[in-house]
Amino acid sequence: MSDASAHALEHHEPVTSTGIPNKKVLMWAFLGSDCMFFGTLISTHLIYRKISATVGGNFLDIRDVFDIELTSFSTFILLASSLFMALAVSAIHKGNLKSTRWMLLGTIIFGAIFLACQVYEFTHFIHAPGNELTLSTYRGEPHVFGSTFYVLTGTHGTHVAIGVFWLLGWLAYSFTGKMGTIHALDVEICGLYWHFVDIVWIIIFPVVYLMEYAL
Amino acid sequence: MATESIKYLAPDTENKAKTQVFPRPGQHTTGLVDWLTTIDHKKIGLMYGLTALFFLIVGGIEALLIRSQLWDHNMSVLTNREYNQMFTMHGTTMVFLVIMPLSAAFFNFIMPLQIGARDVAFPRMNALSLWCFIGGGLILNLSWFFTGGSPAIGWFGYAPLTDTRFAEVMGDMGPDFWIFSLQILGVASLLASFNFITTIINMRAPGMTMMRLPVFTWMTLVVSFLIILAFPAITIALVELMFDRTYGTNFYDFLEGGKPHLWQHLFWIFGHPEVYILILPAMGIVSEVIPVFSRKPLFGYGLIVFSGAIIGFMGFAVWSHHMFTTGMGVVATSAFAMLTMLIAIPTGVKIFNWIGTMWGGRIRFDTPMLFALGFITMFMIGGFTGIMHSSVPIDAQHQDSYFVVAHFHYVLIGGALFGLFCGFYFWLPKMTGRLMNEKLGKFVFTLMFIGFNLTFFPMHYLGMIGQPRRTHTYNEGHGFEMWNQIATIGAFILGVGIAIGVLQFINSFFNKKLKPAGKNPWDARTLEWTLSSPVKEYNFARTPIIKARDQAWENNYGPKENHSEKEPLDDHGVHMPDRSWWPLITAIGLFGLAMGMLFHRTIDPSGELVRDYTIPIIAGFVAILGMIMWALEGPGGYHLFPKEDEE
Amino acid sequence: MTSIFRKFIPISHILIGVFLILAGSCSRIDHKQSALDPKGLVSQNQYDVFMLSVWITIFLFCAVGGCLLYVLWRYRAKTAEEAKEVPPQSHGNSMVETGLIIASSIILVILAVPTLQGVVLLNRVPDANDAESLEKMGLDRSQIDGAITVNVTGKRFFWVFEYPQFGIVTANELVFPATKAVRINLRTEDVIHSFWVPKLAGKMDLMPGQENFMWFIADQKKILGESDAATAMPAVHDGTMRAKVFAKQKFTDEFEPVGGLFYGQCAEYCGNSHAYMSFRALAQTDEDFDKWVKRFQNAQNPNLATKPYEPQSSYSKGSLVTFADPKLGASTNREYRSIRQIAPGQSPQLNPGAWEKAHSDDYEKGKQLFASLQCVQCHAVNRTGLGAKGPNLTLYGLRTSLAAGWMRNDEESLSKWLKNSNDIKYGNLMWNGEGVDDRHPLRNLENDDEKVNQLVEYLLGQS
């Protein structure tokens, strides 16, 4: 067994031309691509935000819909989850399985809180009395703000959800007894993804939410 | 026989036990299961190639129907809707199901051999790309059988024609099929590109520095970067369109606040890099072939690589030249016109350098060289008309006329397809181990060259005398008839040429009478030609240590210090990753997800819209299950022990 | 040898024949929709830049292609041995490469300058106060000052032309003064279309939710050629244009004998019948244009509509009134024209001798049918009809073409069109639009020659 796993280990992480593991290059390439995904969505939102300020003669005052306190809280939660993620990566590098488990759990819980906030936010917005913001309408009039807003933040939420499931996978795997430092790289890559999703939110939050209060 | 020298190492039984649902196929799997579960980049490349050739025939038949309809004024071979479906399907098929996957076939098969790798970085992901591509192609062509038939929105799908509001058939599903198939194809392209990028950056043999990479590999890298940066734009545009059509959002609905202009921007931010995604691989192939048949190294290697990268980079800055007539205003129009003219310079550099390569060489006119020369001349014409279109006043007359049709066919057939056929004639001996009939090859080239020019050269003139494109018929009295007839005759000649070519390729896999190719039939220059033909499962028995660019040539003709060396044989053999079912199952899951989403809406007897997500959820679950099992089974593997002298 | 030679003679004859045919058809490039035969300032500019680019690229193609041919010939491997030789392995020459890059940049600059000028010309009507540039373009100030504006609305699959200065609306045939600049505002109510009259100007798209602008000015000298205005630009307002076009021209003629008639086409794919979405533009002398506008204004002016007969009024000779005519049907009115001065109380019923029928019975019946068959839901004729869904049919009898420029506007085509428009223009909205199904009277005209004739009489009578 030990011999076989030694071989497995050797083939698992072959020597690469750059010295960076393949999986990491893959994740960086993916993140580069993902930047373009969010770039497209965010610019769609911004373009429409500018040209669709009024609807049916009413000025679109999205502040009546937004709940900035809640969103600030969930932003803070998501940022905090990044800390847990970093700690989890550091723990697995050291081979501290127990600590890894707790930190993973922390990340998952905070990620889940963020998602819960988003679900609450969405349902709240759709049913905001007098200010209903749905996918296609605002105050019952056709409007494009709901379209860009929900699809943009929804896509981000989907990214968070995928991250949460990925982390849950690692948490489950940690109980099989096979997890060890050989998986440090995989957890690190998962962490890369998680931090990226966080950073995207750091862009979305001011651009989509805060800017409504500044201007 | 290589197999005699191979000891079979029992797979890690403990690992296998976890994935008993589908027992992992072992080393000696053959037949259908082998092809379904293979993760060998060469087999995947072949499947890419053969599927794409099949779609080439399908798209070609669509093209011939289009040409038959245009034979004379007011013909009724097709109704107007059928015609519109035909050009939509022809465009989408040729771009996404033919040229891109044919390029991907060469990326898969040749690129790892050129850099001295045993496989791509993620072999199972590579298989997933293949199955996603096939799934996407299937979805697109399934559209013929459902409400409304195939999409009739053009391959560009300009909003708001794609809006349900403007559907010309009640409950038209064509655009939905188009959206989902492009999404799945996008997944395939993105995964493949991540894979190639990682492979080229990380898996080069020792000594294979970036500036020693064959140009084809360089172009693979550039194209992969183009794909990962350009596809997100179309993916998001399609997501938005999907939401518009399915959930009533207003992204492109101008009556409710949307802007159809946005679609055009997003589409062309993807669409223009896409043009380079289609042409750069062909340029890479030609840059390999011309030095071989001139027996000289590529003239200005650095400049060719650099101009390829510049073309890729600038490709993101010129998209709006597809929109000169949409009223963008003087400033934007002028800026994009100037940038578009600039991009002609790196393209010109390539042509100069190819001629420079031939200068002073010993030029042989074998079939690959003929196709390469055809590429240069035809691409030159396409490029020149491209420069014309960069000039706004000219474009104002040419836009959406047959002149544009002529232009991009010169680039995409005279350019990309000639380049890819050049690649087939050049590399098929490496893939099959057999030489093809030169005379037949030259005959195919002659037919294609004549047919192609006969079809598309008159279209320049047709455009200038006012025939608009995408019209299913034309009125008598415009003087269009004769030129259209010439074009139609040419199209059939071209069709016959391509069909013979495709048959010749397929024949070379099975015909045992053909002459064996040997290691290096063309006296070619790059690393793949140091291997036996066909290439062994493990590619390189011993990893080569690269000493120079054009390693195969240097080994034969270069000074001693430039000869490549080989790493010693490993005691525990060449590690080969195991075959796997999970890429296929994941792809089936994604396919089911797309189909489920297509059919999740029904109208109940009372006229209410009912949404039923059972199938998408089940299919999504299959996809996720596939990924989990994939992660759990690990790369696995067995070891091969090639003999000292085997390549 | 000779036999082989003889065998080839027919082939060479065929080749020469084909060449002659091709050369012959290339010798005329003034096809109806040809951008190679510019008849306006903007299209002339576009043509000039195009020809410049053609010469540049022909030069480049010959230079590069010539180089290529020379290299292929000079360095071909003549023998099998030569093909195995190893030539000097040179890797490049940076001087040559840099030189070529600089040379190609210079060539691009040659094209870039007229391009930028063209962009401005395309998008902006020259400033009337800028005498210098007007002179350069050979324009007179009055040509800009007297510019007319046309709001073009694209619909699937026809065109609406509105003249806001004159308050009139027409469809599918754009009448414009040959000497004046024409400003075109482009809008659409459904999908994207593109407005293209190759001989006058390049195209511009009609974008939903946005108004685009283009302009053109015809070159009267080019339109006239060697003939006079009456021949080259027959008047539209009195039907001369229609008569001339019909007299001189078969619909299938490849070249247009009437210089003032231009062909246009939707150039952006817009759905099933995109191919059928063409239109015409008719150039007029200033005088004829003014007359046409007047006629149109009168026809569309609700105050000038024929009023019912009033017993207490007296009427001068030639007055028009509407009055009941039981022959046409119960409580149905028809138009009467007075033959002489009419005293009060002399209604057409009491004094038939003093009045004549303004139109034939068929015309009047057609008019009734136009309402009763629900045509008015979509089409407006003069002041009648609600609809803006279909083309406005005011002065329809003056039009040269039918079905958005697809057919010649005569009795035969019109009755074919009315009987089954879907046959001619599959997917057209008259047959397939909202609210039109098999019960719609329009779809049941196929075997009703009488009604069709009456409608034709009525519609072509709109002149």
Image: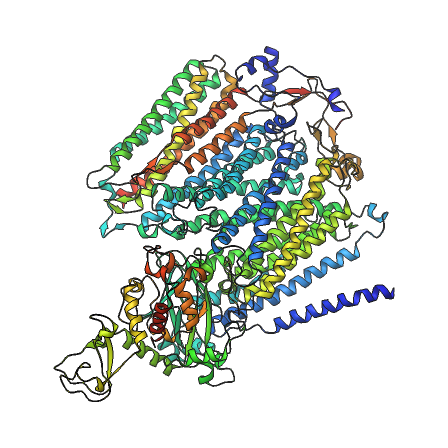
Q: Between C234 and B275, which is closer to the camera in this rendering?
A: C234
In the image, residue B506 sits, relative to residue A103, either above or below, namely below
In this rendering, does residue C409 appear at all? no
Residue drawn at the location 44% of the way across and 48% of the way down: B266
Q: Residue furthest top?
A: A1
Residue drawn at the location 26% of the way across and 41% of the way down: A133
Q: Position of residue C344 (x, y in %)?
A: 13, 85
- Coloring scheme used: rainbow
Q: How many marks?
A: 0
Quadrant for the C terminus of chain C in the image: bottom left
Q: Position of residue C127 (x, y in %)?
A: 38, 73
Q: Residue furthest left?
A: C312
Q: Residue furthest right?
A: C1
In the image, residue C207 sits, relative to residue B561, either above or below, namely below
Q: Between B565 and B144, which is closer to the camera in this rendering?
A: B144
Quarter of the image for residue B514 reads top right
Q: Between A18 and B42, which is closer to the camera in this rendering?
A: B42
Quadrant for the N terminus of chain C in the image: bottom right
Is residue A117 shown left or right of residue C269? left
In this rendering, does residue B112 appear at all? yes
Q: Between B432 and C140, which is closer to the camera in this rendering?
A: B432
Q: Position of residue B69 (x, y in %)?
A: 55, 57
Q: Position of residue C435 (x, y in %)?
A: 32, 55
Residue drawn at the location 49% of the way across and 68% of the way down: C198
Quarter of the image for residue C300 reads bottom left
In the image, residue C336 sits, relative to residue B202, either above or below, namely below
Is residue C234 shown left or right of residue C74? left
Is residue B523 shown left or right of residue B464? right
Is residue C114 shown left or right of residue C439? right
